[in-house]
Every structure is written in C-alpha cells, then in structure tokens.
Amino acid sequence: MPLDDLAAALRWASTLLAPHTARPQVEAEMLLAYLLHQPRAYLWAHPEAALTPQQAADYAACVQRRVAGEPLPYITGQIEFFGLTFTVTPDVLIPRPETETLVEAALDWVNAHPDAVAVDVGTGSGCIAVALVAHAPSLCLYATDISSAALQVARVNAERRRVAERIVFLEGDLLAPLPEPVDLIVSNPPYVADAEWDALPLSVKQEPRFALLSGADGLDAIRRLLAQAQTRLRPGGLMLVEIGERQGEAAQALAQAAFPKADVAILPDLAGKDRVLAVVSL
C-alpha cells in the first residue's frame, strides 16, 4: 500500500499490526510520531501531511520490526514510566505499569522517613531508582545490578533527569555490593518460572532472559534476596518486592520464614492482583 500521507500510513500499519498487538492503532501512531519527531496529536491534526519516500521506507521498516516481535520500546528507545520518559535498550527489562504500585508504596514510606537510606536491587533501566529520587527531593539511594550494560542505561536515565548525583550505582548480585545496612529495600527481581518461558509472548522473549526467569517456581531470586536482607535491612525498615500475580501466598510464606518477627503483607496493583511483597522489619 502506498504510504503517501499520514492517514494512509497509519491505516496500513494498523492493519499489519492488528494480529500482533492489542493496541494496533496506538502503536502505529507511536512509531510514526517517533520517526517524525512529533507528538501523536500532530498526526491527528495533519492526516493529509505527506511523507517523503525516505520517511515512508523508514516507517515501513519499523512496523516490520514490530511485526517480527521486537518490543516497541526497543524500536523507539524509550518508554513512559511514572510520568517520566526513560531510555531503554535490549540490555534492560522494559518498565511496566504494574511496577508503579511498588514506587507509590515506597514514596509513601519515604515521605514519612525522609532520612532513610535506600537501595533499588536489580535496577535495570533505573526506572524505580530515578522515579523515587525524582519525586523525593531529599532521598539518596544505592542502585545495584549484576549487569554492567544495564547500569550504563540506568546512569543515562539518572543523568537525563538530573538526579545522578543522588544515586550510587553498584555492580553485583542483589545486595552483595551494598556497603552498609539500609532502611528501605525496593526490587523488581526476576519472578517468571522457567517452565513458563515457552508460553511468554514473542516480544517478551526479546527482553533479557536473566531479568525474567527465576527457577522452577519463579521465586529463586526472591529467596536469595530475603536471605541477604536479613543482615542488610535495619530494624524498623521496609522491604518492597514485586511479585507475580499468583505468587502472593508463597512469597508471604517465604518472607515470614526469613523474618519471623516482621509484619508481612501483600499489596495489590490497580487491577486488584497480588503485586508487591511488603516486609516491615521489627
């Protein structure tokens, strides 16, 4: 189909994307807006605007990449999370709306404990760490990741939001590189069971496997994190860990075993699904 103008290009792309995404029109618009360096509103206001042959070719190539299963944020190189724009690459997990539940719970606690020392474990793109310090002006925190490539992306995002001076990036496994105990631990660790890999959408399989899979029941990383936190979480501190929607009961039992005297709860996301393990150390 000729991609002579914006309206024609969007019709073509939406049709092609329909079998591959639940939001074909939205994704078609996002890709075209990205290529034109314009907001999506520009597309709606100027449907008759012409595309150059090069723009049409570039757009067709991007749409074909999406059809082939490449996640849209890897094509555009960015995604919105907690009201902020983050750079993402195939080296990091793509931030998801469900994780905002963890950020909101952490900010509520930080507002009541402004002098807290915090750590974001497995920071990836840095979306949690950057969102926290961007919305809590007095907060400084550590951010750890086992991947040096991921830490490079996280630093880019921290610098983009001008908060890099309040985040100490540490390379290592979970809490291992942490130089001191902390008051707040936040983490979105891997929590997909190994056997679930084949059933994941093709686009999800393009993300770092080590950031998704976590053993037979998907809880291996959470087990190790809880074990390390026993000596790294200060009395009265809070630990918030994202979990899968069917892992609430098992995660709560693991936390209670690791912290017998702690208050342990499962926080739901906006859809009412189990999403965050909360442990208040006593």
Image (spheres, helix red, strand yellow):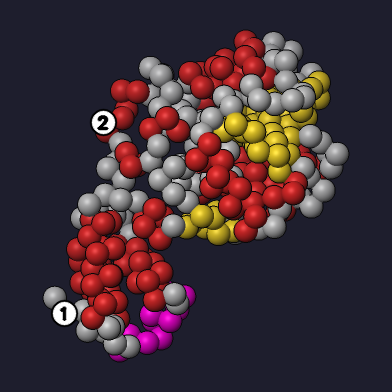
User: What residue is rendered at 31% in x and 30% in y?
Assistant: 197
- Where residue 162 appears, as percent x and y from the top left, is 70, 57
Q: In this figure, which residue is indicated by the disc labeled 2?
A: 198
The image shows residue 32, relative to residue 19, as above or below, that is below
Q: Nearer the viewer, residue 68 or 198?
A: 68
Camera-nearest label, 1 or 2: 1
- Where residue 42 appears, as percent x and y from the top left, is 43, 81
Q: In this figure, which residue is indicated by the disc labeled 1?
A: 2
Does the magenta run of residues contain 46? yes
Q: Is residue 81 visible?
A: yes
Instruction: Find the distance from the CA under tag 1 to the CA under tag 2.
Output: 37 Å
Instruction: Name the chief secondary structure element in magenta.
Output: helix
- Where residue 29 appears, as percent x and y from the top left, is 36, 70
Q: Secondary structure at mark 2?
A: helix
Q: Nearer the viewer, residue 77 or 11?
A: 77
Mark 2 or mark 1, which is nearer the start of the sequence? 1
Does the magenta run of residues contain 232? no
Type of the residue with mark 1: Pro
Q: Which residues are magenta?
A: 39-48
**Quadrant position of the C terminus in the picture:** top right
The image shows residue 193, relative to residue 39, as above or below, that is above
The image shows residue 224, relative to residue 59, as above or below, that is above
User: What residue is rendered at 27% in x and 42% in y?
Assistant: 202
Drawn side of residue 10 relative to residue 149, left or right: left
**Quadrant position of the N terminus in the picture:** bottom left
- Where residue 168 appears, as percent x and y from the top left, is 70, 39
Q: Quadrant of residue 231?
A: top right
Type of the residue with mark 2: Asp
User: What residue is rendered at 23% in x and 81% in y?
Assistant: 53
Q: Quadrant of residue 76?
A: bottom left
